[in-house]
Structures are given as structure tokens and as C-alpha cells.
């Protein structure tokens, strides 16, 4: 699956819908493996710990926050073992979204932004 293809764009849209629904419902973050399974159920082969997963998560965050002022939807996806996002999330948060602080601070603030931007209230 390559960026710019209809297959990639369809997977990106499906991922965005899954994460937006979870954010709007105030759901707990989802594990990479579970997200991969939900995408597979919709016909998208995106292995949990793959370059494609990393690219899609970054692109979904960019799509939903092009100016970097709203929450990064990729904050909703966590590693099973650590129960926090992977390293790619923090790199993106710092490099492209201008987030500051240690990993705990960045993720905590992002979860607050998710509630603010997408929560019911």
C-alpha cells in the first residue's frame, strides 16, 4: 500500500472514521492490533506494527488538524505493552505539531485536546 493510491486513501479514510468515532464517544485509546483488525474487517490490510500503520496514523492526524491546532487523532492508538503511543507519535507531535515536554506531558495534553475538540459537551 503506497501513499497517493486509492487503496491508501480508502484505508486513511476508514482509520479516520474509526478514530473520530472513538474520540467523539470518549472511548479509551485503542491498541495498534485492535485498530489493525478493525481496518481488516473493512478490507484494509494494515499490519499493527508496520510502516503503513505509521504513515496512516500520521496522515490522519495531519488531515484532521492541518494547522496543528486541534488534537492529534493518533493519540488514540497505543502499544499493548506500554499502554501509550509509539515513538512515531511523539516524533510527529514534536516535529510537526510543535508539542513540547516529555512523553507523558505530550500524551496527557493531547488526550485533553481530544476531549475538548471531539468530546460531547
Image: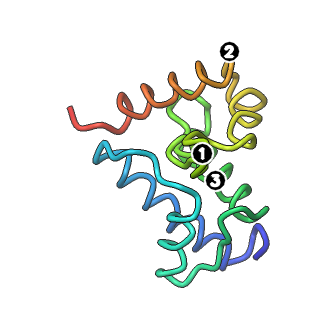
Q: Is residue 16 above or below residue 78?
A: below
Which residue was labeled with disc 2?
A: 101
| Residue under the image location 59 percent in, 52 percent down | 60
Instruction: Tell me, yes or no, whether the two marked residues, 2 and 1, touch with CB atoms within 8 Å.
Output: no
Image coordinates for residue 88, horizontal then vertical, percent: 74, 43
Q: Name the mark on residue 98.
A: none
Instruction: Tell me, yes or no, whether the two marked residues, 3 and 2, touch with CB atoms within 8 Å.
Output: no
Which residue was labeled with disc 3?
A: 57
Cα–Cα gap, marks 2 and 1? 19 Å
Image coordinates for residue 107, horizontal then vertical, percent: 56, 29
Mark 2 neighbour class, 10 Å CA radius: few under 14, some 14 to 19, many 20 or more: few
Left or right, 102 with reference to 120: right
Image coordinates for residue 29, horizontal then vertical, percent: 45, 46
Mark 1 neighbour class, 10 Å CA radius: few under 14, some 14 to 19, many 20 or more: many
Q: In this view, does 66 lie above or below 50?
A: above
| Residue under the image location 57 percent in, 47 percent down | 78
Q: In this view, does 93 lie above or below 77?
A: above
Please identify the quadrant where the N terminus is shown. Answer: bottom right
Cα–Cα gap, marks 1 and 3? 6 Å
| The one of 4 and 83 positioned closer to us in this rendering | 83
Instruction: Tell me, yes or no, whether the two marked residues, 1 and 3, touch with CB atoms within 8 Å.
Output: yes
Which residue was labeled with disc 1?
A: 61
Number of numbered markers:
3
Residue farthest along the front direction in this orientation: 81
Under circle 3, the secondary element is helix
Nearer mark to the viewer, of 2 and 1 = 2
Left or right, 45 with reference to 40: right
Image coordinates for residue 12, horizontal then vertical, percent: 59, 64
Residue 94 falls in which quadrant of the image? top right
Residue farthest along the top direction in this orientation: 101
| Residue under the image location 73 percent in, 57 percent down | 55
Cα–Cα gap, marks 3 and 2? 21 Å
Amino acid at each position: 500500500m503506497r501513499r497517493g493510491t486509492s487503496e491508501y486513501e480508502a484505508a486513511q479514510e476508514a482509520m479516520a472514521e474509526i478514530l473520530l468515532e472513538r474520540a467523539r464517544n470518549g472511548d479509551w485509546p485503542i491498541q495498534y492490533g485492535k485498530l489493525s483488525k478493525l481496518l481488516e474487517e473493512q478490507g484494509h490490510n494494515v499490519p499493527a506494527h508496520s510502516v503503513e500503520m505509521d504513515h496512516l496514523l500520521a496522515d490522519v492526524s495531519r488531515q484532521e488538524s492541518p494547522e496543528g491546532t486541534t488534537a492529534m487523532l493518533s493519540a488514540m492508538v497505543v502499544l499493548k505493552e506500554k499502554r501509550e503511543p509509539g515513538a512515531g507519535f511523539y516524533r510527529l507531535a514534536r516535529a510537526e505539531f510543535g508539542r513540547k515536554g516529555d512523553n507523558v506531558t505530550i500524551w496527557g495534553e493531547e488526550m485533553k485536546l481530544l476531549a475538548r475538540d471531539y468530546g460531547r459537551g
